[in-house]
Image (cartoon, rainbow, N blue to C red):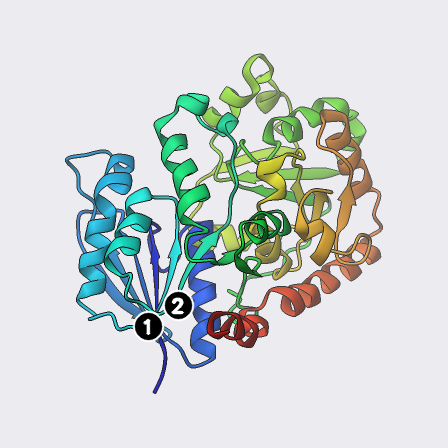
Amino acid sequence: MEKRIFICTHSNLPQGDANSNYIFHMALALAENGWSVIIIGRSNTTERRELEIRGIKCINIPLIRKVSPKVEGHIYYGKRMLKELQAYHIKRDDYIIIYGGYLSLFSEIGRKLNFVQEGHIITCAVEWPTEKQFKYGKFDLDFLFWHRVFYKWMPNWLKTIVISNNLQKHFNEEGCTTFLLPPLIDCKKKVQGIHTSKSKVQLIYAGADARKDAIKNMLLSLKELSESERDKFEFHITSLTIDQAGDLLGPDKKLIDNYKQCLHIHGWMEYDELIQLYYSSDYLLLAREENQFTISNFPSKVPEMMNYGIVPVCSRVGDYTGMFLHNMKDSLIFEGASVKQCADAIRMIIAVPQEQQRELSENAIMSAERYFDYRAWSKKLTEFLTS
């Protein structure tokens, strides 16, 4: 008889953002090993959606428009999740993974499903922000809710899936049994595109999270480069709009117009357009300062782009540069995230001979399959859950 596992989250499924991708590829790893997987997330519309993809059932609970999404999440969402779970007549031997930061999600499952067998409720931690990452600091309501989730509820069942060594160390100290699971990908389901050859080196940054990524410094680094250096590359930025970039740069926002020959800010792109940009890109530039937030996280864009042969050029921060990437073999790793250090990273990139770039790209694809393909984690994840 196949084992049932429910993944309860606040994210929209099956895919959409980094959280959705992490959850769905975890589900694929479980289904690969014979689990019956049901993911219950939150719709971004007022309609309930239910679909099945690759044998995985995805249910999206509709939004309540009368209240803000955060209020709904922390106060009401757990009750609505519980209603969905009860429709499946949860049994003692079922498994439940709780992913997200909404207090009501954890508290409702903790109080109403306490008959589930010990070791069968597992939490999942992928971030560890500090009060600095919240608008009103330690007085921010979101921070207070999150703080209770992270320190009270996540260790409550003593079994936690974590995305980083830093989180693993914390939950181990809390007495939990932990399993480190990086962001996974499907190496066999790569969207096809056309490889294009360009005279200039193509850099890409995909994201808009200035809390983690040193986006401002990556942009300001263009000022540090000479005109002849800027003529050797094009820097493509997706997800971030020109207005958002201008807000980040403040008085330096003129550089967006001044460096049009090398800076291309695309904003939100259609999926087909984004994939084609991947196929024409050589390097992912990713600068991050070292702090609790960044060392606890693992950017999903790294394995995703490696799968397309894009070579990550990253600050030496977090597990991906310490455990999974190999400098000068499948990636280029640099120190720090200051404006000067970002400029030096670009100089390093444009100095790489084309033949070496092709070798780095081929190695990046092989490393993506070796370290991040969901099939490689299927058995190990099952062993953790059932131990």
179 sits left or right of 241 in the view: right
Label 2 – label 1 distance at C-alpha: 7 Å
- Amino acid carrying mark 2 in the image: His
Residue position marked by numbered label 2 in the rendering: 120
**Contact (Cβ within 8 Å) of mark 2 with mark 1:** yes
Image height check: is 242 above or below 352? above
Which circle marks residue 94 in the picture?
1
Report whether residue 189 is seen. Answer: yes
Quadrant hosting residue 294? top right
386 sits left or right of 105 in the view: right
Q: Secondary structure at mark 2?
A: loop
Q: For the point 34% across and 87% down, which residue is it?
A: 1
- Amino acid carrying mark 1 in the image: Asp
Task: Give the mark, 2 or 1, whose residue is nearer the N terminus.
Answer: 1
Give the residue at the far bottom of this rendering: 1
Residue 176, x across and y down, in percent: 52, 57
> Which sits in the foreground, 287 or 268?
287
> Which sits in the foreground, 108 or 323?
108
Which circle marks residue 145 in the picture?
none
| Crowding at mark 1 (Cα within 10 Å: few <14, some 14-19, many 20+) | some
Residue 358, x across and y down, in percent: 77, 59
Q: For the point 47% across and 26% down, which residue is it?
A: 244
Image height check: is 277 above or below 249? below
Image height check: is 134 above or below 361? above
